Image: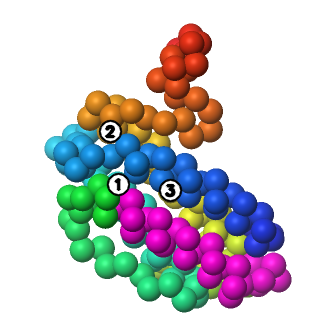
Amino acid sequence: MYRTINDFLSDWQREAESTLKLFEQLTDASLSQRITAQGRTLGRLAWHITVTVSEMTHLAGIPIPALADEYVDGPTSAQLLKDTYQRDADAVAKLVAKHWTDEMLTDDVPMYGGDNWKKGQVLSILIGHQTHHRGQMTVLMRQAGLQVPGMFGPSYEEWLAYGQQPLK
C-alpha cells in the first residue's frame, strides 16, 4: 500500500513505460493471438489493462472518465490500444497528484463488490494488476512471434543483442 503520492508516481511512471514498451510491439494481426480457445486474446488482455486504468481510479474517486469495455476481444487496432493507454496513464498521474494527498491514502473507498479499500491500496493493486496481465501478454506475444522487451531486466532477445548468453 502506498503511503506517499510521490512513491506511487515514481513507480507509476516506470510501470506505465513498461506497459507501453509491450504495447509498442503489438501489431494488428497479433491481437487475435490466443493461448486456448477459451482464453483471452492478446488484444483483449491489452484492452483489459487499458480499461482498468480508468475504471479502478474512477471508482476510487479520481475524476477520470471510465472507458466503456466495449470490445469483446479487444480493439483490432494496436495503435488505438497504445494511444488510449498512454492518454489514461498520463491522466492518472496528473489527477492523482492534483486530487489526492499523502494523508488521503489511508482513506477508505468502496470498490468492487462494496469492499472498502484504502486509497493507497487502490494504487498498489492498480500497478500489480497491470504487471500480472503484462506477464500473460508476454506468453501470447512469443506465440505470435513478437519481440518481447525486458520489464525488470533484459529479455532473452535483449541478452542476445548484448552478446550475452541468455539465462535458461
Q: What element carries label 3?
A: helix
Q: Magenta stretch containing residue 100, yes or no?
A: yes
Q: Say which residue label 1 marks.
A: 45
4 on left or right of 58: right
Residue drawn where x is 78% and y is 83% of the image = 101
Task: Identify which residue is drawn at 58% across, 85% down.
Answer: 62
- Around disc 1, counting alpha carbons within 10 Å, would you say few (fewer than 14), some (14 to 19), or many (20 or more)? many
Disc 1 element: helix
Check disc 2: other Cα within 10 Å, few if <14, some if 14-19, many if 20+.
Answer: many
Q: Principal SS element in the magenta part? A: helix
Query: In the rendered structure, does residue 145 fall within the stretch colored magenta?
Result: no
- Residue found at the very far left of the displayed protein: 37
Quadrant, the N terminus: bottom right
Q: Give me the disc on residue 130.
A: 3
- The three-letter code of the residue at mark 3 reads Gln
Q: Which mark is residue 140?
A: 2
Q: At 32% across and 39% down in the image, what residue appears?
A: 140
Residue drawn at (33%, 46%) of the image: 26
- Left or right: residue 90 versus residue 157 is right
Could you tell which of marks 2 and 3 lies nearer the N-terminus? 3
Give percent across and percent down for residue 154: 58, 29
The range drawn in magenta is: 81-106
Q: Is residue 121 left or right of residue 83?
A: right
